[in-house]
């Protein structure tokens, strides 16, 4: 009896480790942006069967990409305080098992997208998977401090993927959503990176604060924040979103700018980490406001 309890506990634990390979919290926020993309693609509600297939397919492929990242980065992760407790560095999951797991997730996700949505969505999602798991993780991350700027395209793709799942084509408005996440990614990541600079230096990863110093990174965070604020105005300027969005996003932007200035001035040591966590809340709220605005415009 005691033995069977122990076995159950162990199998619960192993599933928790496999779940960790999927970066579930990051993927959950990406899926929020994808679902908002699906809703904004059409004036009414998108067909439920498409929403379910697209969410499942994009989610499985993003989780597969995250699992490949754990495999490719296992030696780097072992050297960093933030990541050394992950399943691969700890030896809790073998690299070959993690790769097989990633392959199952990706193939399943691809099949769901092919049969449940359309070929364009499936190919674009595959491109995002390769963009993150191979181009960013294997090449850019180790090669250049612009790694996360270029790699950010893959992470920014989900609203486009959601949109294309509904309409079958890439439309200009969908790219505005991609642009916002693309401009948001550098402040999101570099704020954390300042805080974890020594980790990256120890692992030999050329992140911006390591290669160009903290002061330069703080300036870049501020400049990208200004760029991001400008990109958030586009949905209003093109008429995709209305006044509710504009007011909501400006309130969110004021707080983002407040943190960017605090980080830039380097007055308090805690600002970069606080800015990182605010950036996560910001992107979630921004997509919620886009959604609220979309359906409130429909009611007018
Ligand atoms: C190349 C682009 C990106 C990079 C380099 C990046 C980097 C990171 C890093 C290093 C963390 C800390 C993870 C940890 O400690 O476990 C993190 C957390 C997070 N990121 Fe990003 N990120 C990127 C794009 C995105 C995107 C596109 C989203 C969502 C739309 C996102 C949402 C999140 C969330 C929700 C967390 C918090 C996870 C938690 O609660 O542990 N990130 N990011
Ligand atoms: C199909 C699709 C939409 C793919 C996108 C996949 C995806 C999960 C992107 C996540 C972005 C992210 C957390 C990057 C950090 O990686 P890192 O290796 O720099 O951070 P780490 O050190 O925490 O692993």
Image (cartoon, rainbow, N blue to C red):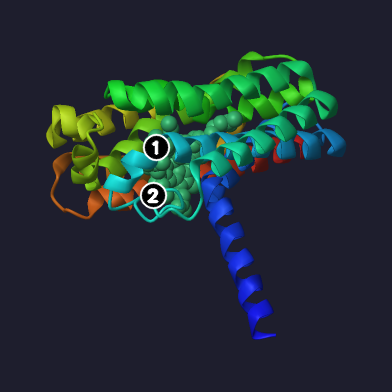
At 56% from the left and 45% from the top, the residue drawn is 22
Residue 252 position in % (x across, y down): 44, 44
Residue 126 position in % (x across, y down): 63, 22
Horizontal side, residue 57 vs residue 226: left or right: right
Front residue (pair 44, 168): 168
Q: Residues within 10 Å of mark 2 (few under 14, many from 20)?
A: many
Indicate the quadrant containing the C terminus: top left, top right, bottom left or bottom right.
Answer: top right
Front residue (pair 29, 36): 29
Determine if residue 268 is in view: yes
Queried on whether the Cβ of the residue with tag 2 lies below 8 angstroms from ligand 2, the answer reads: no
Q: Residues within 10 Å of mark 1 (few under 14, many from 20)?
A: some
Residue 174 position in % (x across, y down): 62, 22
Looking at the rendering, which quadrant does residue 8 occupy? bottom right
| Contact (Cβ within 8 Å) of mark 2 with mark 1 | no
Q: Write down the residue under mark 2.
A: 89
- Position of 263 relative to 169 (above/below): below
- Sequence order check, earlier mark of 2 and 1: 1
Q: Name the secondary structure under disc 2.
A: loop
Front residue (pair 6, 216): 6
Q: Write down the residue under mark 1.
A: 73
- Position of 231 relative to 60 (above/below): above
Horizontal side, residue 99 vs residue 187: left or right: right
Indicate the quadrant containing the N terminus: top left, top right, bottom left or bottom right.
Answer: bottom right
């Amino acid at each position: 009896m005691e033995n069977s309890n122990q076995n159950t506990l162990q199998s619960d634990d192993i599933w928790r480790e496999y779940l960790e390979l999927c970066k579930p919290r990051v993927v959950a926020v990406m899926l929020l942006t994808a679902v908002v993309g699906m809703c904004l693609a059409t004036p009414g509600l998108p067909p439920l069967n498409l929403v379910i297939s697209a969410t499942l397919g994009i989610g499985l492929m993003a989780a597969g990409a995250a699992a490949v990242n754990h495999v490719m980065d296992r030696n780097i992760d072992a050297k960093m305080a933030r990541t050394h407790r992950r399943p691969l560095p700890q030896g809790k999951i073998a690299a070959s098992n993690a790769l097989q797991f990633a392959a199952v997730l990706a193939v399943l996700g691809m099949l769901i997208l092919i049969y449940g949505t359309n070929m364009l969505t499936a190919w674009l999602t595959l491109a995002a998977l390769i963009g993150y798991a191979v181009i960013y993780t294997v090449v850019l991350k180790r090669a250049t401090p612009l790694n996360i700027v270029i790699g950010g395209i893959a992470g920014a793709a989900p609203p486009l993927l959601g949109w294309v799942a509904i309409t079958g084509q890439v439309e200009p408005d969908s790219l505005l959503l991609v642009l916002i996440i693309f401009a948001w990614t550098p402040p999101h990541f570099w704020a954390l990176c300042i805080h974890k600079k020594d980790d990256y230096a120890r692992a030999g990863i050329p992140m911006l604060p390591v290669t160009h110093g903290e002061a330069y990174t703080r300036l870049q965070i501020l400049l990208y924040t200004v760029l991001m604020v400008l990109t958030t105005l586009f949905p209003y300027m093109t008429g995709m979103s209305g006044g509710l969005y504009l007011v909501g996003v400006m309130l969110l932007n004021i707080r983002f700018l407040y943190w960017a200035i605090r980080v830039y001035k380097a007055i308090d040591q805690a600002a970069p980490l606080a800015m990182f966590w605010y950036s996560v809340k910001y992107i979630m709220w921004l997509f919620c406001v886009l959604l609220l605005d979309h359906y409130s415009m429909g009611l007018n």
